[in-house]
Image (cartoon, grey):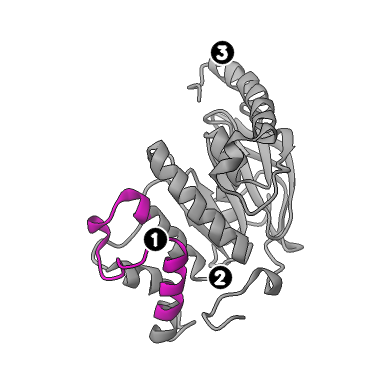
Amino acid sequence: MNTAGFETADEKSRGAINIRNVTKVYDPDGACVLAVDNCSMDISAGEFCVVVGPSGCGKTTLLNAIAGFHGISGGEIYLDGELLCTSERMPKPGSDRIVVFQNGALFPWFTVLENVTFGPVMQGVMAKKDAEDKALHMMGQMGLQGISMNYPSEISSGMRRRVEIARALMNNPRVLLLDEPFRAMDALTKTVVHQFLLNVYDEYKTTIFFITHDLDEAIFLGSKVYIMTTRPATIKKILEVTIPRPRDFRILASPEYQRLRDECISAVHEEAVKAFKAGEREM
């Protein structure tokens, strides 16, 4: 572990997720909605996994099961080879799996620094001074210098999202679960936030399970892109993103990026059309 209190990529080999034949039925005694059907995924430790698919196809259902927010109706989910949940065993939320949602969750009455250090200090994992040193280091990596004493209402939406990610990573989670965290951002802000997220990922290699509707975002960030079918969700295609890291905006003009984008658009569009015809809201 380095002097700032972080685990570096070489020191960390954890966060492998294995989803085995997972099924999820909502309201089994009533409407009986099959949201996920026999879905399997193998996400390596340190992988940046991105999941895309039509709205309502079951992406967030999988994320919530990994996070421990609800159970599954069939199959198993493993974390680092340990059974996380089955249909008979409810998963439990934990600090090893941190979620960053679409809507912000910063404490408005705390400064940015107090927000970022809240978890490890309250849990007694770190002394306040050590937590502050670690937080300032992380915030510097994410372009958040000079705002530690500001309140969330005093900074931009792009900064708030970065603060939330820094706060999540303060706990050294095995898995970072991101549910469309940049959905409300304009294109210019997204490009900046993407680069800072990649910078942090490249150094610490925390396993990331990232849900998005933005195909450019998926390819730019991801190691693999899992393309889901319309509901009930299963894996239609796994796209290996062969673009080397570290990455920056210049890859957007590369032939390989365009090839991957075309392949992704073709697969997702087919499912979006099916969802639209079935009465779902198209992406």
Q: What separation in Å lies between label 2 and label 1 (alpha carbons)? A: 15 Å
Q: What separation in Å lies between label 3 and label 2 (alpha carbons)? A: 43 Å
Report the span colored magenta: 132-160
Q: Is label 2 in a helix, a strand or a loop?
A: loop
Q: Residue at x 69, y 74 (%)?
A: 11
Q: Alpha-carbon neighbours of circle 1 within 10 Å: few (<14), some, or many (≥20)?
A: many
First in sequence: mark 2 vs mark 1? 1
**Residue 101 visible (yes or no):** no
**Residue 7 visible (yes or no):** yes
Residue reaching furthest to the top: 277
Q: Disc number at residue 132?
A: none
Which label sits in the foreground, 3 or 2?
2
For the residue marked with disc 2, what is the amino acid? Answer: Asn
**Circle 1 residue:** 163
First in sequence: mark 3 vs mark 2? 2
Q: Residue at x 50, y 25 (%)?
A: 283
**Circle 2 residue:** 172
Q: Quadrant of the N terminus?
A: bottom right
Q: Residue 250 falls in which quadrant of the image?
A: top right
Is 57 rendered above or below residue 11? above
Q: Disc number at residue 277?
A: 3
Q: Is label 1 in a helix, a strand or a loop?
A: helix
For the residue marked with disc 1, what is the amino acid? Answer: Val
Is 63 rendered above or below residue 237? below
Q: Residue at x 73, y 63 (%)?
A: 80
**Residue 150 appears at what percent x and percent y?**
25, 65
